[in-house]
Amino acid sequence: MTVREATLADVPAMVDLLERRRAAYQHYQPVFWKKAADSAEMSKAFLPFVMGKPETVALAADQDGALLGFLIATPTPAPPVYDVPGPTYTVDDFAVAAPEHWASAGQALLSRIEAVGRQRGWAQIVVVSALRDLEKSALLESGGLTIASTWWTLPLTT
């Protein structure tokens, strides 16, 4: 397995992984995580846009030309009421091809983004995950990440 910078050639496979993640997440919380009908098309446009920003870090894990996983880290300003001692990067798009890949590809990606962040002087990395994404949560916990916030939701529509 190789961890490398993600390229525009990876976008179709990245979109496929995101669509699979979205399908699973909408079962966890069907209002908050409800997948938009055109989410794949939006991702095909958004990923090249965000990957083209110089401050974005996009990584891919592949084996024999098959994308096993990827993550995208983007800078996120801390609220001014908190004194975070340096840049915060958020990893919102972080997906693997199958749950069993969290322990391999997911771990390799997480280790690489941590190394990048340390080298660049980031204060912290924030990773977004659904509460019921148990394999991803296990990876994050084993990687030393801690829960800083939770979002609670009450669907008001059916």
Image: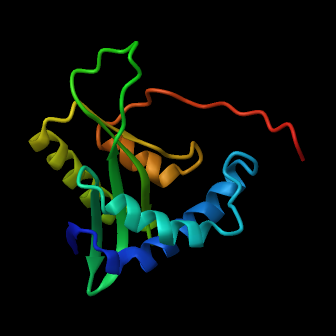
Residue located 29% across and 43% down the image: 143
Q: Which residue is situated farthest in the left direction here?
A: 119
Location of the N terminus (image quadrant): bottom left
- Spot occupied by residue 108 in the image (x, y as percentages of width and height): 24, 60
Q: Looking at the image, can residue 67 be seen?
A: no
Residue located 28% across and 73% down the image: 7
- Spot occupied by residue 114 in the image (x, y as percentages of width and height): 21, 45
Give the left or right position of residue 4, taking residue 72 as reference: left
Residue located 62% across and 66% down the image: 39
- Spot occupied by residue 43 in the image (x, y as percentages of width and height): 52, 66
- Spot occupied by residue 19 in the image (x, y as percentages of width and height): 57, 69
* Figure coloring: rainbow
Give the left or right position of residue 42, taking residue 81 as reference: right
Q: Quadrant of residue 40?
A: bottom right
Give the left or right position of residue 73, taking residue 86 as reference: right
Q: Does residue 12 lie above or below 32 as drawn?
A: below
Q: Does residue 109 lie above or below 45 as drawn?
A: above
Q: Looking at the image, can residue 151 be seen?
A: yes
Residue located 40% across and 12% down the image: 81
Q: Does residue 81 lie above or below 86 as drawn?
A: above
Q: Which residue is situated farthest in the right direction here?
A: 158
Q: Does residue 80 lie above or below 43 as drawn?
A: above
Q: Quadrant of residue 90?
A: top left
Give the left or right position of residue 138, taking residue 122 as reference: right
Q: Nearer the viewer, residue 81 or 34?
A: 81
Q: Nearer the viewer, residue 140 or 5?
A: 5
Q: Quadrant of residue 85?
A: top left
Please tell me how many numbered marks the rendered image carries: 0
